[in-house]
């Protein structure tokens, strides 16, 4: 796995407050890395630091496996916080200006305008755009110069449901067809869950956990809940059907990982052994609940 | 660096404020010459009965000097208007990337803060030359229309170059306030208030301490500009004016680099 971004004990302090606290993060080529954290957890500060907008207080980071020299940074597109736009200029003029910095072909501009749904804005000044349109233009600027890595901070802020879907499809298209790696933060955990391949959870500046989508699915996999009259006896019956370490016992309830054994078989065995089963339900954990639990709420 | 220069110059030449401020600089230069001409005419009519002095002596006694195209060109920049207009434009240009939050787009694309400020300083330098050139040209043309072109002397080239250097000093001070405050409103206010207030304070200090004007004032840019506008200024005074121009340019540019490099965008 080729790392696109790797941070080593990266720390950013503002006076006495530590916004990013010794973060070791790795984003590999092709990832759509969902960055999750509460407001003020340090997501934006970390993004700003790896984009050199903020100067690190401690630690360092590598880009594409090397020290972050300007030539490597030019391979990154970004939209952090509110989009940086020249409000008195049209969408096209904004893109044309930034195409100089991104060393992009000016012909790319019309293509990008179409991609972000701003092809028909003509001479309308960016200052008169809606929040969603400004957000799209910000994404357009990030796309200039065919970046290999795009950092998006709350990219669907202010977008309507159709706009959110369009941005989601655009990210998936760019990731799958062009191999672009993404680092995306969003408060819309469900939305992030639809596109991210890896997740990083940050709380109070510390990276609490990094996990892949399959790992998340595994952790949020459903459980079978049996409410029985004799849990001890039931436990001894279940030990023959599932890994005893995975079986949880909460009072009269036994929780067995879904898929360990067919629910009908477990139920039959329990009944055959003289255990009375009063309730049998399949419980599934929501991703959102998992993240909230990890965020420490 | 080439990209940053293209970016900054494209931005600068597409700003309507550049043309508005340049237009205002031309208008104030023409109006200043016209006012001088009108006052001169009234004065000469009033004292036409005094035959014992020549008209040029009388004009000089009344403070009317350099009454021709070249002379008006040389004193055009001593007026506070072109400096103030340049201050307004520099504040707008430099603060635009802070107020529109586009600075992060530039730094995020791998351009260093030093490179970014250098490109801005190049654009500001160009703007400074433009403001100086149009003001001087307006002064020359107006002076030529109201009087005559006058005789060109080689010394004028030195004075013009010295005035450009002093204008660069002003530009460096204006850039410094702009990167320090990051807000165009605050920077405009400071760029307007600072030079005039400082001049006034130094004049008061001169009068209180030395009981004559110019001892301390000549170390500030407005005093240096007065020196550089005088066709009869001696060599030592010109060197002092040049030193002031260089010092303000170097010190305030250095301070701007220091601020930009130490702060997040």
Image: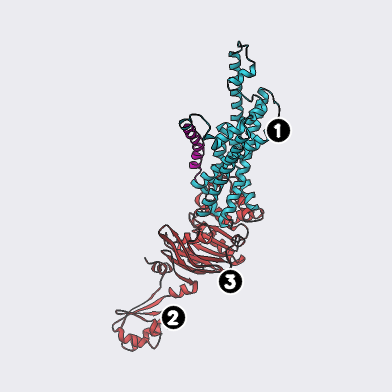
Chain colours: A red, B cyan
User: Which mark is drawn over residue B154?
Assistant: 1
- Density class for disc 2 (Cα within 10 Å; few <14, some 14-19, many ≥20) is few
Q: Are marks 1 and 2 on the same chain?
A: no
Q: Residue at 68% of width from left, 25% of height from top?
A: B144
* Residue B221 x/y as whole percent: 56, 37
- Which of discs 3 and 1 lies nearer the camera? The answer is 1
Q: Are marks 3 and 1 on the same chain?
A: no
Residues marked 1 and 2 touching at CB (< 8 Å): no
Q: Are marks 2 and 3 on the same chain?
A: yes
Q: Residue at 51% of width from left, 34% of height from top?
A: B199
Q: Is residue B187 magenta?
A: yes
Q: Is residue B213 left or right of residue A285?
A: right
Q: Is residue A199 magenta?
A: no
Comparing B197 with A128, the one in front is B197
Q: CA distance from mark 3 to mark 1?
A: 67 Å
Does residue B84 appear in the picture of this structure? no
- Density class for disc 3 (Cα within 10 Å; few <14, some 14-19, many ≥20) is few
Q: Secondary structure at mark 2?
A: loop
Residue B52: image quadrant is top right
Please name the residue that numbered disc 2 is placed on: A259
Q: Is residue A260 left or right of residue B137?
A: left
Comparing B242 with A128, the one in front is B242
Tag 3 or tag 2, which sits nearer the N-term?
3
- State the extent of the magenta-drawn residues as a range: B183-206
Q: Secondary structure at mark 1?
A: loop
Q: Is residue B145 left or right of residue A215?
A: right
Q: Secondary structure at mark 3?
A: loop
Please name the residue that numbered disc 3 is placed on: A2
């Amino acid at each position: 796995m080729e790392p696109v971004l790797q941070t080593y004990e990266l720390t950013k302090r503002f006076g006495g407050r530590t916004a990013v606290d010794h973060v070791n993060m790795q984003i590999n080529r092709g990832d759509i890395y969902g960055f999750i954290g509460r407001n003020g957890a340090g997501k934006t500060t970390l993004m700003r630091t790896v984009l050199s907008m903020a100067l690190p207080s401690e630690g360092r980071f590598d880009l594409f496996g090397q020290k972050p020299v300007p030539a490597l940074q030019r391979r990154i597109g970004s939209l952090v916080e509110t989009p940086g736009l020249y409000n008195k200029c049209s969408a096209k003029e904004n893109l044309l200006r930034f195409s100089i910095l991104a060393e992009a072909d000016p012909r790319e501009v019309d293509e990008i305008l179409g991609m972000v749904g701003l092809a028909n804005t003509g001479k309308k000044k960016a200052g008169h755009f809606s929040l969603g349109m400004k957000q799209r233009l910000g994404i357009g600027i990030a796309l200039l110069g065919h970046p290999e890595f795009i950092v998006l901070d709350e990219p669907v802020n202010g977008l309507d449901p159709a706009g959110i879907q369009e941005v989601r499809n655009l990210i998936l298209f760019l990731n799958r067809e062009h191999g672009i790696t993404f680092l995306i933060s969003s408060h819309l955990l469900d939305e992030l869950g639809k596109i991210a391949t890896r997740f990083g959870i940050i709380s109070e500046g510390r990276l609490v956990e990094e996990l892949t989508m399959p790992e998340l699915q595994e952790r949020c996999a459903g459980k079978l809940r049996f409410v029985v009259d004799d849990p001890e006896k039931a436990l001894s019956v279940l030990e023959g059907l599932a890994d005893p370490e995975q079986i949880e016992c909460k009072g009269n309830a036994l929780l067995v990982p879904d898929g360990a054994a067919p629910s009908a078989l477990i139920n039959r065995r329990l009944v055959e052994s003289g255990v009375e089963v009063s309730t049998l339900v399949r419980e599934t954990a929501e991703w959102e609940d998992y993240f909230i639990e990890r965020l420490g709420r | 660096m080439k990209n940053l220069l293209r970016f900054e110059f494209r931005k600068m030449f597409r700003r309507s404020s550049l043309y508005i401020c340049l237009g205002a600089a031309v208008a104030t230069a023409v109006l200043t010459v016209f006012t001088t001409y009108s006052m001169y005419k009234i004065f000469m009519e009033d004292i036409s009965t005094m035959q014992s002095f020549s008209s040029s002596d009388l004009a000089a006694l009344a403070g009317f000097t350099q009454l021709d195209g070249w002379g008006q060109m040389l004193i055009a920049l001593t007026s506070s208007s072109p400096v103030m207009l340049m201050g307004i434009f520099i504040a707008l240009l430099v603060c635009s990337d802070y107020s529109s939050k586009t600075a992060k787009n530039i730094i995020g694309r791998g351009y260093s803060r030093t490179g970014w400020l250098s490109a801005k300083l190049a654009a500001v330098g160009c703007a400074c030359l433009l403001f100086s050139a149009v003001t001087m040209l307006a002064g020359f043309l107006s002076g030529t229309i109201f009087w005559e072109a006058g005789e060109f002397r080689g010394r004028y080239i030195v004075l013009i170059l010295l005035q450009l250097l002093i204008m660069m000093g002003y530009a460096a001070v204006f850039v410094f306030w702009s990167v320090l405050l990051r807000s165009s409103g605050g920077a405009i206010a400071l760029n307007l208030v600072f030079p005039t207030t400082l001049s006034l304070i130094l004049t008061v200090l001169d009068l209180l301490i030395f009981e004559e004007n110019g001892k301390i004032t000549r170390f500030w840019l407005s005093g240096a500009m007065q020196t550089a506008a005088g066709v009869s200024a001696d060599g030592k005074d010109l060197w002092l004016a040049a030193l002031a121009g260089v010092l303000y340019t170097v010190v305030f540019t250095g301070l701007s680099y220091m601020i930009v490099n130490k702060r997040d965008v």
